[in-house]
């Protein structure tokens, strides 16, 4: 009996831990879309992203100092963190720029296109091969994403009438797709908290340099409480926590499978929108969301 109980309480294996991390990742990321859409026109994307990176770096830096600490070996090849920080900073700036005109649900649908692009970057950087079954599942998810992005309007799909916000955010998603396999490619054994702290520091420095005019022009004392809530949520939960979860999962799962969990984001966002009183998308986009969820199920059934 004790053996059975011990088996039932056995710690999940590395792959299962990676999957659980990405469930939390998708839920936390969804919140940044809903909150970001509510404040996107109240603060510059560059200023908001620079501030969130600074807060995230301070919080994570305190965690590192209280735990493993920084070592000289962690600073080997610092160009790695500059590339990673610039890549993810570019993504977040374009995310908030896109949210100025696009809805949270439609941008989340664009986000679900990242697994396809991540699979390509995963092969390029890591030579990870996508199986035919996985490719089919990714194609189904992409079809569902397009259905939502074009709001179930076949005429708009045929004419490829993409909104400005969705188009801007798609460019950012290309950067995000490269970020995941690069995390694994550049890792040299550093703890996840150390890596993400250094990425946040590098991202903040780059944004402070290239977006200083926006940062200096922002009246920080006049920002609304909702902007500050969004800032700290995105800094602590949607940056520090999700980057840790992303690296944790990226070291245990193939890159394409890690990013497959982005397929959960539109479903989470519908719950976030309901909780925030923002309403839900029309019933016509639900088939697209169903295809996205089906793609996730197909990818996970391989395990």
Image (cartoon, grey):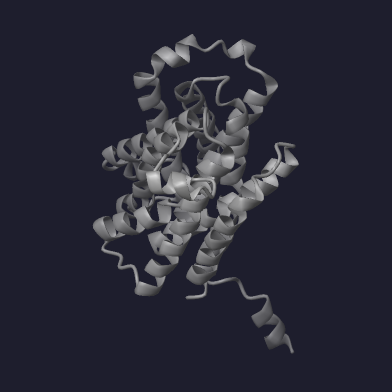
At 32% from the left edge and 53% from the top edge, which residue is drawn? 188
Residue 66 shows in this picture = no
Whole-percent x, y for residue 239 in the image: 52, 39
Q: Is residue 7 above or below residue 128?
A: below
Q: Is residue 11 above or below residue 187?
A: below
| Left or right of 236, for residue 71 | left
Whole-percent x, y for residue 299 in the image: 48, 69
At 53% from the left edge and 59% from the top edge, which residue is drawn? 292
Q: Nearer the viewer, residue 162 or 52?
A: 162
Q: How many marks do you count on the picture? A: 0
At 39% from the left edge and 19% from the top edge, which residue is drawn? 211
Whole-percent x, y for residue 106 in the image: 53, 43
Q: Quadrant of residue 241?
A: top right
Q: Nearer the viewer, residue 34 or 247?
A: 34
Q: Nearer the viewer, residue 145 or 176?
A: 145
Whole-percent x, y for residue 83 in the image: 30, 38
Q: Is residue 272 above or below residue 53?
A: below
At 52% from the left edge and 29% from the top edge, which residue is drawn? 101
Q: Quadrant of residue 72?
A: top left
Residue extending farthest to the front is 155
């Amino acid at each position: 009996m004790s053996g059975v109980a011990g088996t039932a309480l056995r710690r999940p294996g590395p792959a299962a831990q990676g999957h659980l991390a990405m469930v939390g990742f998708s839920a936390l990321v969804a919140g940044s879309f809903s909150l970001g859409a509510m404040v996107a026109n109240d603060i510059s994307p560059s200023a908001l992203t620079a501030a969130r990176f600074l807060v995230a770096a301070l919080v994570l830096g305190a965690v590192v100092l209280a735990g493993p600490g920084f070592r000289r070996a962690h600073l080997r090849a610092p160009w790695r963190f500059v590339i990673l920080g610039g890549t993810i900073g570019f993504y977040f700036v374009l995310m908030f720029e896109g949210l100025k005109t696009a809805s949270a649900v439609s941008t989340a649908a664009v986000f679900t296109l990242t697994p396809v692009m991540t699979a390509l970057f995963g092969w390029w950087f890591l030579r990870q091969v996508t199986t035919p079954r996985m490719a089919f599942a990714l194609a189904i998810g992409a079809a569902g994403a397009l259905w939502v992005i074009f709001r179930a309007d076949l005429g708009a799909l045929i004419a490829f009438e993409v909104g400005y916000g969705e188009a801007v955010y798609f460019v950012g998603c290309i950067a995000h797709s490269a970020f995941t396999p690069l995390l694994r490619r550049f890792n040299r054994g550093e703890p996840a908290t150390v890596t993400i702290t250094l990425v946040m520091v590098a991202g903040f420095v780059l944004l402070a340099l290239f977006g200083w005019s926006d940062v200096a022009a922002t009246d920080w004392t006049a920002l609304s409480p909702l902007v500050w809530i969004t800032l700290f949520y995105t800094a602590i939960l949607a940056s520090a926590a999700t980057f840790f979860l992303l690296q944790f999962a990226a070291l245990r799962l193939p890159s394409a499978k890690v990013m497959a969990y982005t397929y959960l984001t539109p479903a989470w966002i519908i719950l976030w929108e309901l909780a925030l009183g923002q309403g839900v998308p029309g019933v016509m986009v639900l088939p697209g969301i169903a295809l996205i969820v089906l793609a996730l199920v197909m990818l996970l059934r391989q395990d």
